[in-house]
Image: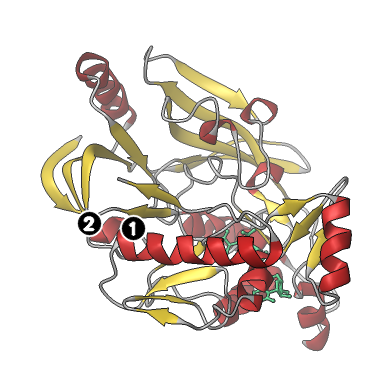
Amino acid sequence: MILQQSVSLKPYNTFGIDAKCHYFVQLQQRDDVEKWVAMQQQSHNSFFILGGGSNVVFHQWIEKSVVKVSLRGIETVKEDAVHVWIKAAAGEIWSNFVTFCIEIGWGGVENLTDIPGTVGAAPVQNVGAYGVEAKDVIETVECIEIATGQWKKLTNAKCQFGYRDSIFKQAFKNQYIITAVTFRLTKKPNLQLSYGGISSRLEREGIEQPTIADVSRVVHSLRINKLPDPALIGSAGSFFKNPIVTHDKHAVLLQHYPDLVAFPLAKSFKIAAGWLIEQCGWKGKQFGRVGVYPQQALVLYNLGGCTGEEVRQLANAIQQSVKAKFDIDLEPEAIFIE
Ligand code: EPU
């Protein structure tokens, strides 16, 4: 366990915000996790568990202890003729894990190529892209209850996964530390190509029988055209969730806006938040050191040295104008940490 005081969080959040925290704790092995949990039970300090920092906006000075889960390791747990079960430690970088699976030829996470963050953060907000969500491949989540020090292995059903949601954002919020995730992957590809232009891109390339490596490559190229490269530009990916509205609300919207971008769900519609934000005139706008990404209005990005407060002000202004024009509440996907 590494304990530090007065640490800059700039390397630990993909927005690149140069906030500082009083106490920074790095948990590097299972033993560290148990030790920190025991310390926490004595001190009851307020804390924030940090994964890859790809979904957070830090305020300038964080009073809470920031606890970074840095456990590493990927292992095969079991396999049969069709599936393979892989356990990855929470601190593994998600995209490294995806690359590892693709190089071996195990399918299931190829659509989730290039998502920033760590393996341990994936179940918390059930990361998703191009028609696949982490919940589709997660078998179990290993975690420790902070109040009791008890280890638990939650099944997929127990995690209560939803759109960018899970029990770890609801009833278990701030009560557990995730240390590892076991995924069930396929030995023979079961490709999901219908979403977001994957199949049309493959057709254009003349690829009739794509491999998981082909799909991963296409997802990579679709993403670099729309989303900022995390190595060059600070952002938190999609800043807001796509709002879900009723059939009635959708019908009313469609009357006023025939070019509305919406996807039907079982009993509702998911509206493209990027479209709503663009319609309000925000796309490509810059405000001081923070902007709305020119290729994807759902992404707020750092023009260099922005603060959490600047991001919050822009996010609030966007929410207000979407509310005023469409009567829709946009919910941030990113979380603000004070
Ligand atoms: N659109 C616009 N203007 C914009 C952006 C989008 O009109 O500025 C419309 C377009 O019609 C576009 C549609 O919205 O076709 C959907 O956009 P896109 O395919 O980029 O997907 P998204 O719904 O904006 C979601 C995820 C992304 C994920 C993509 C691809 C959420 C909040 N975001 O974005 O996830 O990569 O689908 O599957 O669900 C993330 O969570 O950080 C993230 C990047």
Q: Return the x and y of residue 300 as percentages of the image width and height.
A: 46, 69
Tag 2, which secondary structure? loop
Q: Quadrant of residue 170?
A: top right
Residue receiving disc 1: 13
Ligand 1 neighbours mark 1 (CB distance < 8 Å): no
Residue receiving disc 2: 19
Q: Nearer the viewer, mark 1 or mark 2?
A: 2
Disc 1 residue type (three-letter): Asn
Q: Return the x and y of residue 281 as percentages of the image width and height.
A: 58, 80
Above or below — where is 52 with respect to 325? above
Q: Return the x and y of residue 204 as percentages of the image width and height.
A: 80, 87
User: Within the displayed image, which quadrant is ligand 1 positioned in?
Assistant: bottom right
For the residues marked 1 and 2, what is the alpha-carbon distance in whole angstroms? 9 Å
Disc 2 residue type (three-letter): Ala
Residue that appears at 48% across and 45% down: 121
Residue that appears at 37% across and 20% down: 146
User: Would residue 25 be found to the left or right of residue 273 on screen?
Assistant: left
Q: What is the quadrant of the C terminus in the image?
A: top left
Tag 1, which secondary structure? loop
Looking at the image, can residue 114 be seen?
no
